[in-house]
Amino acid sequence: MANTIQIKRSSTATETPSASDLQVGELAVNTADAKLFTKHTDGTVKELAGGGGSGMPTSGGTFTGNVTFNDDVKAIFGNGSDFQIFHDEDNTFLKESGTGSLLVQTSFMAITKTDGTSNMAKFFNDGQVELYHDADKRLETTSSGATVTGTAIVTDNLQMQGNTYTNFSDWWGSGDNSAFFTPYGYLGSNGSFAVSLFSNGYRNASGGFTSMGINSNSTASGIELMPTGEIKFRTGTPSGTTVPQRMALTDTGLDITGDLTLTSTDAGASENPTLDLFRNSSSPAVNDIIGHITFSGENDASQKTTYAEIETIITDETDGTEDSSVKFNAIRGGSSTTYYQIGFGVNQFHQDVLIESSDDGATGNPTLDLYRNSASPADQDVLGKIEFSGENDADQKVVYAKINADIIDQTDATEDGRLDFGVMAGGTLQNRLTLRGNGVTQFVNKDVEIAAGIVLRFEGATGDANETSLTVVDPTSDRTITLPDASGTVLTTGNSDTPVTTTSSGDADFVLVDDGGTMKKITPSNLGIGGGGGGITVQDEGSALSTTATTLNFTGNGVTASGTGATKTIAVNGNEVLISSGSVSDVSSLDFDNTVITGFEQFRIVLYNVKTTTDFRELRMRLGTSNSADSSNLYQQSIYQYGMRSTNQQVSAAFNNANNSFLYITAPNNDLGTGTGENLYAEILLPNPTSTTDYKHAVVRQSNFGALPAIIGQRISALAYRKVDALNFVSFFMESGNIASATFRLYGIS
């Protein structure tokens, strides 16, 4: 009786045994799927065969799943195993070992990286072949050749052959006397002469140039490597058998024949093009000439002569403190002479300097601009100076004269400057003339003499054809005119009428009387004093003086005389003196400095016809003790104003402030306007400007037809400036914009 062996089995489709169902090497079968399984030594279940039980027929068939070839298992094609595909432990092989060729036939083929992300090579049907390096195309074949992107490095001989001239011996013969044709020129050597490359010809065996006329060119360009070590660059129209030499590299440097142009297309901020003369010395030292540019030509003896040169010299080679100088030399009398030297601390001209312009227009040319380009300009900065130096008898350099320019005020839109002229006097450099933009012009340290025949002319307030000239009669001896220590008007006899009663011009004593604007001379005889007549009685407020005299003197400020008949009135108007008066227009401020705010116990300033350039703006005031306006918060004031608007509406307001940076002349709600007829009148009294122990007061009275429009007056305006130093500066300015116009009077009160 036959024995039947049954293995583990299942008739359920797709069911597979688990690892716990089998021992290693034990078999199991799925009868529904016709699949055979076993347990591998690694503990997993492996499918051995099955799935329908049909194998690949020897006559052909179709694989419907993967076919796995283990390492060194080959797929072999051909009766003689001619073509094999296999993989060893490291590499994959397509091996054609037969007598024929391996042919790949396709309309397009691409070789890519294993992940397919970038190309390595492409092959196009009837088209180009492309080779890639790291996804970048580097070589592409074309219908006329190949294009290389990047650098092609040839490590062995490179042969080039065109399609026209192939018999090189037709030109120079053979051996060392041969030429090599390229589509754009001829490369060759004639043995003893040079190796050369020319664009439309070649160097022949005799050393001459033979033109071949490539592309019908009438000029040639070429490079020659000479047996002497020189490299010559030639270009231009051949002259006989020679193409002009433009540049040569020799054992001593570089020679250029013709112009040298350095061109850069850099559109950025970098410094291009650059010509760098680099002396790469391992032991740099002071007085090393690190670069030299010469300008040479022929003299009448056909000798090369250096007519000019530029050289740079090291004056300090220390790291971090390097210094240098640049010299500009020119030939003079056959010898090189330094004309200009640029160095640390000072630039030197060694000859005369002429700045000349041929500009025939109205522009200011030529211009010498001394520009101090400071990032932090400040008052008292010396902008520049011109010094005039020479030697003394001790062989020392001495500054005999100088011109200095300084900043007085660097504030934008209110800049002021100063120009000083100084000369050497007794071994000391002294100022003689100072021009100030914000003050008076001063002659200092020496007297000023007006030369013979020179007249001082004053234009006055109006620029017209009328001037006042100050001149003198030719003196027969030194004369002195002393002006009094007082302000006022100097009277002259040039515009006086001589009264009928006046005696001869030899009268020794007389007084001038203002008769309605006409100055008249009155002598003692006219007044009946002395032997002239009946006399005059002088009374002091109704009481007769006890003493009579022949001379009557009136002293003090503000004395005026009036009367046309027998009665004359002498009026003494007190102790107020007019110091300064005038008008301004379109100014940022109206200032009174220490040249006028001085010498009196009190000051009174009268402003009228004051107008503004900007509508609805206040007029303000600042004081100062250092000859400039003080803008610190030391001001306070109390104002009461009263007025009426054009609508018959009454206006009244009180205004107070403290710790302000200015004083109001017109308080808020009392602005100046630009309308027709709008203007301001104001009187400002400074009662204690000279005090050095008390704060300063100011009292203001003003009337303003303002911008509302309204007529407003400030009945009480008490102002204070909390400084104990003596005042010497007063400034008026608008809230913004300029003072369009103003007329002023400044009075001093003793």
Image (cartoon, grey):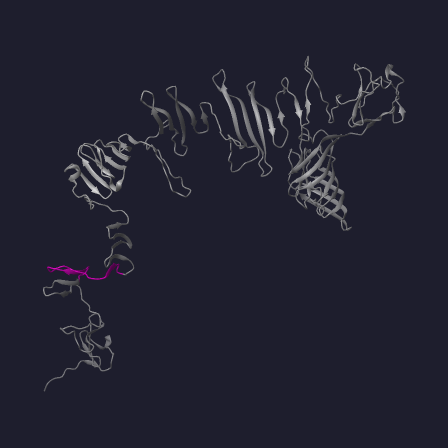
Where's residue 601, x and y in %?
Answer: 74, 31
The percent coordinates of residue 265 (x first, y second) are 38, 42
Task: Give the residue at the far bottom of this rendering.
Answer: 1
Query: Is residue 700 found inside the magenta-colored segment of the image?
Result: no
* Vertical relation: 603 (above or below) 125: above
Out of 108 and 313, give the one closest to the viewer: 108
Q: Residue at x 59, y 38 (%)?
A: 413
Quarter of the rendering containing residue 611 = top right
The boundaries of the magenta stretch are 87-114
Question: Relative to the observer, which residue lies in front, 190 or 292?
Answer: 190
Image x and y of residue 241, in percent: 23, 32
For this orientation, the residue located farthest to the top is 476
Residue projecting furthest to the front? 216
Q: Quadrant of the N terminus?
A: bottom left
Instruction: Say which of 670 and 567 sits in front.
Output: 567
Q: Is residue 61 left or right of residue 402?
A: left
Depicted 92 relative to depicted 60: above or below: above
Is 197 placed above or below 338 here? below
Query: At 64% across and 18% down in the image, what residue appears?
Result: 453
Q: Is 97 inside the magenta-drawn segment?
A: yes
